[in-house]
Image: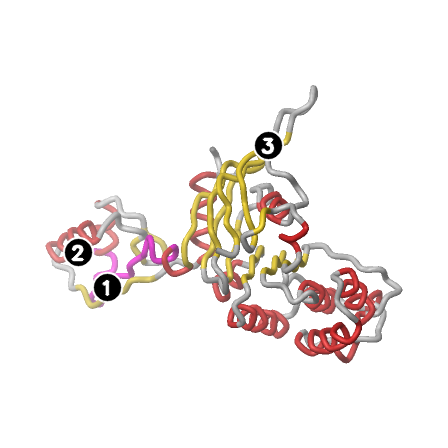
Amino acid sequence: MTIDIDGVEKIYAGTRREPAVHALKPIALQIAPGEVFGLLGPNGAGKTTLVKILLGIVHPTSGRATILDRAIGTTSSKERVGYLPESHRYPQYLSGEKVLRYFGKLSGINNSDLKLRINSLLDLVQMDKWRTTRVKKYSKGMMQRLGLAQALINDPLVVFLDEPTDGVDPVGRKEIREIIARLRDEGRTVFLNSHLLSEVEMVCDRVAILNHGELVRMGTVRELTEEHSNYHIEVGKGQEAMLLAVLTRAGVEIRDGSILRPASLEDLNALLDAIRSAGILIAAVTPTRQTLEELFFDTIGERGMK
């Protein structure tokens, strides 16, 4: 596995005035080569803590983790890792090209290879036109594109991207999704944090939801969004009120004309039998999958008060 996390936990010690904070409860997960993995959660859920632990910035209280079979926190574990933080800043007097050259030299890339790498990355993120422009003149979207190029400068096998499409227009977001898909096709692993759930749904192979430091859901987007399907029932003309009465008597939750998450197919069929018994003609029963956003808020709502 590219990333292997086994029981990683983080507790920040308390003081006389502040209690200890259990930022991350024991977490176990594995991420494969060529996988785009999305980490979701509300503010304070522990996402940043987990990423910083994997990058060796924060030490875990307990547990172990490896990246590319190398223990986290070691120099060797960082050699083929790229990172785009959420709020990245570069010296305002540098041009985009010089920013990449600076980080390339920090990564130990020789001059001839670095020149080729910079040219390739500026073309990839469509920033070649502004390569000699100082970053102080860059828009938010341009800074995100440059940040993505910086995260890829050392030709990483694992890339951590924190809000990569923040401040980017719709066309730019599509282009960044295409870059992420290209990284996956090249066998690279992408660990993605984003508040744009629709973006995550389009690009990620698997997602995990953190809440209060606990891993509460994990799976492929399809598995999670089909886990609790809704069903839309279409009935004969003029029978909608009768249908509503039957569903209300049955205690079924309804939203936008759809039955929300029957416990099982058996329950759904029993409900359909009750509808037919009431003399209602059923024209169609259509399953409708949850969006990732609906799943996310349902999950946070279920556990938010704990």
Q: 10 Å neighbourhood of mark 2: few (<14), some, or many (≥20)? A: some
Give the residue at the far right of this rendering.
93
Tag 2, which secondary structure? helix
Q: Amino acid at mark 1?
A: Val
Whole-angstrom CA distance, mark 1 to mark 2, is 9 Å
According to the picture, the residue beneath numbered tag 1 turns out to be 285
Q: Write down the residue under mark 3.
A: 11
- Specify the segment rendered in magenta: 224-242
Q: On the rendered structure, is 270 left or right of 204?
A: left
Q: Residue at x 68, y 55 (%)?
A: 85
Give the number of marks.
3
- Choose the circle earlier in sequence order: 3 or 2: 3
Does the magenta segment cover residue 3? no
**Residue at (81% x, 64% y) in the render:** 102
Residue type at numbered disc 3: Ile
Q: Are marks 1 and 2 in contact (CB under 8 Å)?
A: yes
Q: Which residue is mark 2?
A: 272
Q: Is residue 151 above or below residue 224?
A: below
Q: Residues within 10 Å of mark 1 (few under 14, many from 20)?
A: few
231 left or right of 50? left
